Amino acid sequence: TFVYKGYTHFNIMQCVGLPEHITKAFTPEPLEQRPTGNDLTPVKAFIDALGAKIKNTDMTRAAAYSPATDTIIMPDLSMFPNEEYYHSTTLHEIAHWTGHKDRLARKGIVESSPKDSASYAREELVADFFAGAMSALFGIEHAPVNDEVTLAQNHDRYLGSWLSRLQDERYTQELLTAPGQAYKAIMYAQDKAGIPLIPISPARAKDLQPVTETVTETQAESEQVTAPVEVASDKKPAK
């Protein structure tokens, strides 16, 4: 006879008062910083102007956006090889943030989507098209991720990993709409920040208004949309 008993588990980030030997064991080691000399004032000002709730932590290397709390969770800057990589990853999460039910209400955010679904794949493409384009607009796309890959190349690899699903007809229609959705997210974000980066045509301006209708299906409380911090599956900043 087998007896099963359930236990409640908490992420170490949700705990307070833990002994130092436990928190230290699960705290990632900081990476060596590699200053590039780029002017990061514009991208910092843009992110700040959006007013998104961003929580920084040194307890994880994985970036994420939680629709349930409308919060972006970012690894501490020390977990990245340079500030450009940190801000580019933040921009990816901001793209997810624009899809919240009170903003652009994208399907991949307001509905609970399994990771193998076309909707989830499209949302990841939207977020990285957004981050790649914004990184280029801010002039940080050539910053190194490591000794072999730049931010632009890292975005290309990540996008390629999702675009490969176009070979599956179940994904084709969803994925082909991703560039347009990313453009709409860029237009919304620059309008929200009040910092124009790309001219907005009058025909597109009406699409940037916050969504007012009620969304019946929302993201599960525990669901988080993770960032392409690295092409590898563990989603951690490259060393």
Image (spheres, rainbow, N blue to C red):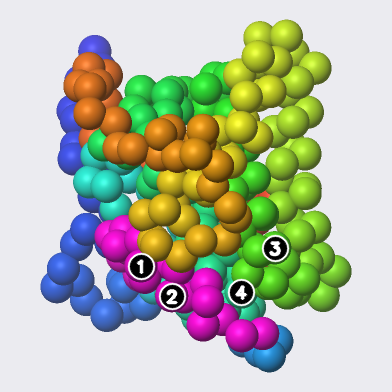
Dot placed on the residue nearer the N-terminal end, 1 or 4: 1
What amino acid is found at the position of numbered circle 3 in the picture?
Ala
Answer with left or right where residue 66 lies relative to residue 173: left
Labelled disc at residue 49: 1
Circle 3 Cα neighbour tier, 10 Å, few/some/many (<14 / 14–19 / ≥20): some
What amino acid is found at the position of numbered circle 4 in the picture?
Glu
Question: What is the C-alpha distance between the residues marked 4 and 3?
Answer: 11 Å
Name the image quarter holding the N terminus.
Answer: top left
Q: Can residue 72 be seen in this view?
A: no
Q: Does the magenta stretch include residue 50?
A: yes
| Residue designated by label 2 | 45
Q: Is residue 15 above or below residue 43?
A: above
Q: Dot 1: what SS? A: helix
Q: Is residue 12 magenta?
A: no
**Magenta range:** 38-57
What amino acid is found at the position of numbered circle 2 in the picture?
Ala
Does the residue at mark 1 contact the one at mark 4 (Cβ under 8 Å)?
no
Q: Dot 2: what SS? A: helix
